[in-house]
Amino acid sequence: MPEAPRVSIILPHLNEPDLLSCLRSLDRQRADGIPFEVLVVDNGSTVLPEGTVSLVSGVRLLYQPIPGPGPARNLGAEEARGDLLLFIDADCIAMPHWLSRIVHYFDEHPEIDIIGGDIRIQPAKANQLTAVEAYESVYSYRARYYVERHGFAATGNMAVRAEVFRKVGPFGGIGTMEDTAWGQRATGMGHRIAFVEGACVKTPSCRSFGELARRWDRHIAHEFGEIEKSVMGKTRWLVKSAVMALSPFGEIPTILRSNRLDTAQERWRCFVCLAQVRLYRARRMVGLAWHDNASSMVDLWNREKR
């Protein structure tokens, strides 16, 4: 029987056209000499990615009929043979030395149980960010902020010791923000988390403002589900929506200081898209306060790809 790999890389999959690019970027990690396996967990694709998976060695294909990236990742973790579990999304590209930097950090810091790596936007056109790409470069993947301020790592680039994952328990289902909930549960139990900037992946941006808005619908609905449904609770929610509408002006210093934007034009595009997003969120928040349809806003994972 072959020796178990030290690392298991787990990625959920649902109708993802960029899967092969992701798998090839993972296969290139073998140049660093660390043995690993890759587990692709299909979550109900129209066409199973058997042909794509067969093009890259060392990849296993699993099937999870329960919808949601959380259940898909849970199945991968159950089947994984490695001592370290690395999570990445099927549309992400692992940058050179991504895996080795995570493994070496764990080796050098035995007190750390969970790692969050950096996530950057891969623009559709090199050196030419659209408004949505400029916005997402600054605001959509604030990996360091998530780790250091909120105690969780985004599962598009997260690593955990396998024994720690088993202690903390599985990710939540489609009705939860599974990475936030899992990470905060883990750190609440005393497990330590660290951000490793050099362990970087890149991901494509949303293709349009409409796609970006649909992503925010899920976040807004989850936030609304957690508030107290009393007059006072809804009043606080409405005050929050008003602050949301005015908040873009307070973000101007952040946009000006960001090292993820290069030109004045990119910073202006970022601000315009930010204002659109915040006004959209405020409007949806007010709508939920009057007509609670939050459950309809928590749509199936990546439904737009179906």
Image (tube, grey):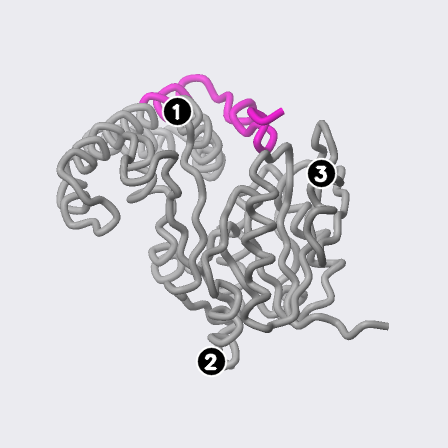
Residue identifier under label 1: 208
Q: CA distance from mark 1 to mark 3?
A: 26 Å
Query: Does the magenta portion include 140?
Result: no
- Left or right side of 159 for 257: left
Residue 101, relative to residue 302: is it above or below? Answer: below
Q: Residue 221 or 94: which is nearer the viewer?
A: 94
- In the rendered structure, the answer to whether residue 111 lies left or right of residue 80 reads left
Amino acid tagged 1: Ser
Disc on res. 49 = 3
For the N terminus, give its image quadrant.
bottom right
Q: Secondary structure at mark 1?
A: loop
Residue 14 lies in quadrant: top right
Write down the residue under mark 2.
109
Give the class, few, some or many, for how many residues have Cα within 10 Å of label 2's Cα (few <14, many ≥20): few
Query: Does the magenta segment cover residue 296?
Result: yes
Q: Disc 3 on helix, strand or loop?
A: loop
Amino acid type, residue under disc 2 in the picture: His
Q: Is residue 31 left or right of residue 46?
A: left
Q: Report helix, strand or loop for mark 2.
A: loop
Q: Position of residue 234 (x, y in %)?
A: 37, 29
Q: Position of residue 36 (x, y in %)?
A: 65, 66
Q: Nearer the viewer, mark 2 or mark 3?
A: 3
Of badges 2 and 1, the one in the foreground is 1
Cβ–Cβ below 8 Å for labels 1 and 3? no
Q: Position of residue 193 (x, y in %)?
A: 45, 67
Q: What residue appears at the point 53 percent right and 65 percent down from the top-left corner?
A: 99
Q: Residue furthest right?
A: 1
Q: Earlier in the sequence, mark 2 or mark 1?
A: 2
Q: Residue at x 18, y 41 (%)?
A: 251
In the image, what residue type sits under mark 3? Pro
- Looking at the image, residue 154 lies above or below residue 306: below
What residue range appears in magenta? 283-306
